[in-house]
Image (spheres, helix red, strand yellow):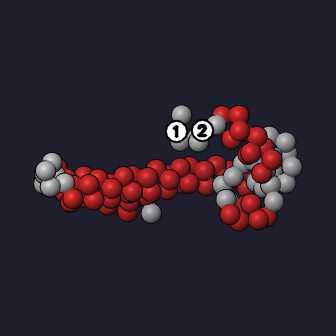
Amino acid sequence: MVADLQAELDGIIAAQNDDPPDDEHDVEGSSVGFERARVTALLESATANLVALDAASERIGAGTFGRCEVCGAAVGEERLSAMPATRRCIVCARASTAESGRGPLHG
Ligand SMILES: [Zn+2]
């Protein structure tokens, strides 16, 4: 998944370098830019998921998977199935989001 996206992004960047967008007729240029941004975002998200899932599998090994890392409460099956890599229960996740006001990938 990550390798596929990386290859796709490399292809888009290569295509952009071979054929730079025309400033006056940038319809194609902006769509390539959009595509590049889309794949970059997918790649970042896939990489982040991979890292998080890696950490999740460590927690499974340690027996702490499914427990909130902050308060120790059960994270909940619904939340885990939606976000298998989550480390916090909904209460702590919300508290943390309210505190920082920013996503983890934008700091
Ligand atoms: Zn919690």
Q: In this view of the protein, which residue sits in the foreground, 57 or 37?
A: 37
Question: Which residue bears the numbered disc 2?
Answer: 102
Residue shown at 26% from the left, 54% from the top: 30
Q: Is mark 1 within 8 Å of ligand 1?
A: no
Instruction: Examine the rendered structure and indicate whether residue 105 appears above or below residue 7.
Output: above
Q: Residue furthest front?
A: 24
Asked whether, in this view, residue 10 is left or right of residue 94, the answer is left
What residue type is disc 1 on? His
Q: Secondary structure at mark 2?
A: loop
Q: Which mark is residue 70?
A: none
Rendering coords of residue 89 (x, y %): 79, 50
Question: Which residue bears the numbered disc 1?
Answer: 106
Rendering coords of residue 41 (x, y %): 43, 52
What residue type is disc 2 on? Arg
Q: Is mark 2 within 8 Å of ligand 1?
A: no
Asked whether, in this view, residue 70 is left or right of residue 51, the answer is right
Q: Quadrant of residue 69?
A: top right
Ligand 1 image-quadrant field? top right
Q: Secondary structure at mark 1?
A: loop
| Disc 2 to disc 1, C-alpha distance | 7 Å
User: Is the residue under label 1 in contact with that under label 2 (CB below 8 Å)?
Assistant: yes
Judge whether residue 99 can be spotted in this image: yes
Residue shown at 68% from the left, 41% from the top: 97
Judge whether residue 64 can be spotted in this image: no
Asked whether, in this view, residue 36 is left or right of residue 70, the answer is left
Q: In this view of the protein, which residue sits in the foreground, 46 or 38?
A: 38
